[in-house]
């Protein structure tokens, strides 16, 4: 199984929000679009329109990785949820790792531990490695070691759900995307850790904006149900 860049971004965002902010889940298309287009905690940065997000959702539904949740209990819009754990037999820690790999591409074990903190608990790097090994040893592997980036000492891991990036060229972006080209590679392990932490702090604001979009949808639905 291999996903298009758009499907990878949509699926990764659904995984992330389902684990990090379950109270706002499943997502409306507006909240999902905002989650896909966050300007931090994403690589590359994209600017999907609603049509791109909906097309990716249809494709993921055909692959039995996403379900559409029809309006009920006062909700007036369709919502969307991923079903990767049911489809592939994964637990929350494995889903958290896959989410980050789908959203940010190849990463070291240290980066993965930092960037999954809001979604799952790992007591040490060895636990992250254990889950990566389990993902890699499946009959249909979901993760693999892609080696070191120049200047780094640590191996990086990627998910096999998306095509591996060409090391000789900049990462390709899908239809409807914008690559800012402002993120230089880390100079070494220390810089790598600082970059991961800094990116996650800056990402909190973008994630809050996505949560506000979801709350706004809830408020509109409530007003509609009350005849307002």
Image (cartoon, rainbow, N blue to C red):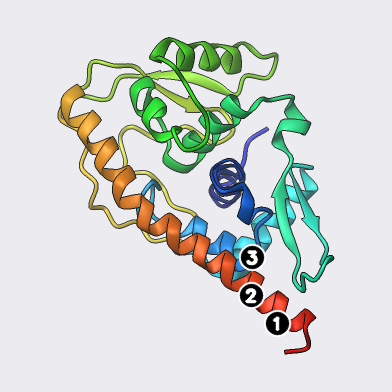
Q: Is residue 165 above or below residue 225?
A: above
Q: State the quadrant of the C terminus.
A: bottom right
Label 2 to label 1: alpha-carbon separation: 6 Å
| Front-lying residue, 221 or 150 | 221
- Disc 3 marks which residue? 29
Q: Residues within 10 Å of mark 3 (few under 14, many from 20)?
A: many
- Disc 1 marks which residue? 223
Q: Secondary structure at mark 1?
A: helix
Residue at position x 65%, y 70% in the image: 218
Q: State the quadrant of the N terminus.
A: top right
Q: Is residue 147 above or below residue 117?
A: above
Label 2 to label 3: alpha-carbon separation: 15 Å
Place residue 84 in its image quadrant: top right
- Disc 2 marks which residue? 219
Counting from the top left corner in percent of width and height, residue 18 is at: 62, 45
* Pointer 2 with pointer 1, Cβ within 8 A: yes
Q: Is residue 171 above or below residue 25?
A: above
Counting from the top left corner in percent of width and height, residue 131 is at: 54, 16
Q: Residues within 10 Å of mark 2 (few under 14, many from 20)?
A: few
Q: Is residue 46 among what the camera can see?
A: no
Place residue 49 in its image quadrant: bottom right
Q: Is residue 192 above or below residue 52?
A: above
Q: Is residue 94 among what the camera can see?
A: yes
Residue at position x 55%, y 63% in the image: 33
Residue 183: mark in rendering: none
The mark total stands at: 3
Q: Residues within 10 Å of mark 1 (few under 14, many from 20)?
A: some
Counting from the top left corner in percent of width and height, residue 21 is at: 56, 48
Closer to the chain start, of discs 2 and 3, is: 3
Q: Is residue 226 left or right of residue 50?
A: right
Closer to the chain start, of discs 3 and 1, is: 3
């Amino acid at each position: 199984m291999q996903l298009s860049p758009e499907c990878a971004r949509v699926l990764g965002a659904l995984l992330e929000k389902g684990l990090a902010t379950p109270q706002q889940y499943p997502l409306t298309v507006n909240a999902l679009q905002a989650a896909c287009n966050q300007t931090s905690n994403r690589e590359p940065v994209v600017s999907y329109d609603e049509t791109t997000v909906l097309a990716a959702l249809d494709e993921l539904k055909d692959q039995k990785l996403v379900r559409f949740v029809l309006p009920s209990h006062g909700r007036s819009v369709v919502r969307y949820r991923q079903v990767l754990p049911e489809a592939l037999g994964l637990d929350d820690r494995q889903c958290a790792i896959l989410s980050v790999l789908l959203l940010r591409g190849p990463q070291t074990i240290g980066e993965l531990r930092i960037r999954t903190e809001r979604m799952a608990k790992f007591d040490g790097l060895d636990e992250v490695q254990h889950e990566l090994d389990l993902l890699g040893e499946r009959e249909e592997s979901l993760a693999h070691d892609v080696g070191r980036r120049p200047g780094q000492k640590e191996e990086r891991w990627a998910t096999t759900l998306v095509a591996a990036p060409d090391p000789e060229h900049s990462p390709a972006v899908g239809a409807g995307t914008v690559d800012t080209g402002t993120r230089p590679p880390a100079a070494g392990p220390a810089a790598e850790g600082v970059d991961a932490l800094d990116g996650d702090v800056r990402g909190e604001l973008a994630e809050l904006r996505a949560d506000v979009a979801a709350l706004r949808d809830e408020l509109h639905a409530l007003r509609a149900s009350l005849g307002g």
